[in-house]
Amino acid sequence: MLIKPLELTALSWQFYIKNWRKLWIYLLLLLIPVLVITAVGIIMHFARTSIISLPVINFLIIASTLVAAAIFTLWITIALTKTIKNIYKQEPVKEWKENISLNSKYIWPTIITSVMTTLLVVIGTILFIIPGIIFFIWYLFVFYTVVLDDKKGIDALKNSKLLVVGRWWQILWTILVPTVIYGVAVSVIMSIVELPIILIQGEIAKAAINQVVIAVINLLTTTPLMTIAMVALYFSAKENKLGQNAETPPSQTIDS
């Protein structure tokens, strides 16, 4: 039987509390792109008078920073996901440097499958909103299929869909509950932590500090908790492929 929503929420929280020491280095590394982007933003703001006549250079600096940050974030996220999987399956956990190095091979396959998934969801949304939502849930596990089971391209998409069809609503509900619970909790924390920031003088300083604070809160809460939840749900779906009490997706034209 597929793991229940509240069970998944409790499991992810308990897992994080028990194993955070094995995950903290990855969360710290994920903060680096945020700090770099924030620093570049501040530098570009104060240097705009000297580059205003060179908009192409301005664009290239910003674009290259964002691309590099996105790739680095993906790389560390892959390593984090692998570590969570190893702990969850009670497998040996590699030292963080070795883990990051070994998992660089997943960057390009993940990018390709992410682009494919995005295109399918966007096309489905353009055709009609409902197909876009259906596709989104179908391909919810694509990243984990690539990283945890070495699937690529079309195979990754097919594998993700196979884990969802027949229990579309169940998968949606199971991941929606912890998402909402953690989302509300994090929003409350942010609203409290951000109160002193309002008193800071200077719009640039206030915006920069606010961006970093939000990133830190997300990296300490939402990122690990939801990654744990998704890994646990992925393996639960794999171990219960037939999906008892299957339900039909919200469209009679979609196979179940």
Image: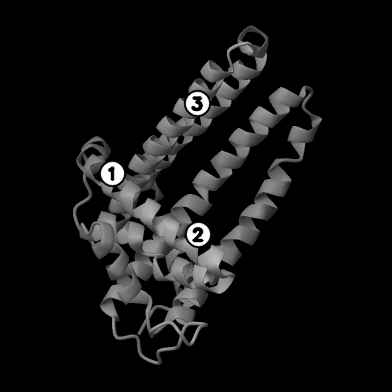
Dot 1 or dot 3: first in sequence order is 3
Q: CA distance from mark 1 to mark 3?
A: 23 Å
Crowd class of label 1 (few under 14; some 14 to 19; many from 20; radius 10 Å): some
Is residue 140 or residue 54 the one in the foreground? 54
Q: Residue 70, how many percent across, how many down?
A: 43, 38
The mark nearer the N terminus, 2 or 1, is: 1
Q: Position of residue 234 (x, y in %)?
A: 34, 68
Proximity of marks 2 and 1: CB atoms separated by less than 8 Å: no
Q: Which residue type carries mark 3? A: Val
Q: Which three-letter amino acid code belongs to the residue tagged 2?
A: Val
Q: Position of residue 114 (x, y in %)?
A: 38, 53
Locate residue 69: give its quadrant: top left
**What residue lies at 28% left-to-right and 74% top-to-bottom?**
238
Q: Which residue is mark 1?
A: 108
Q: Is residue 125 visible?
A: yes
The residue depicted at 36 percent of the width and 90 percent of the height is 244
Q: Which residue is mark 2?
A: 122
Looking at the picture, the colour scheme in use is: one colour
Secondary structure of residue under mark 3: helix
- Relative placement, left or right, of 83 versus 43 is left
Residue at 40% from the left image edge and 89% from the top image edge: 246
In this rendering, position of residue 207 left or right of residue 25? right
What residue lies at 41% left-to-right and 71% top-to-bottom?
138
The residue lying toward the viewer, choosing from 212 and 163, is: 163
Q: Residues within 10 Å of mark 3 (few under 14, many from 20)?
A: some
The residue under label 3 is: 36
Q: Earlier in the sequence, mark 2 or mark 3?
A: 3
Element on which disc 1 rests:
helix
Within 10 Å of the Cα at label 2, are there few (<14), some (14-19), or many (20+) other Cα atoms? some
In this view, the mark in front (2 or 3)? 2
Of the residues tagged 1 and 3, which is closer to the observer?
A: 1
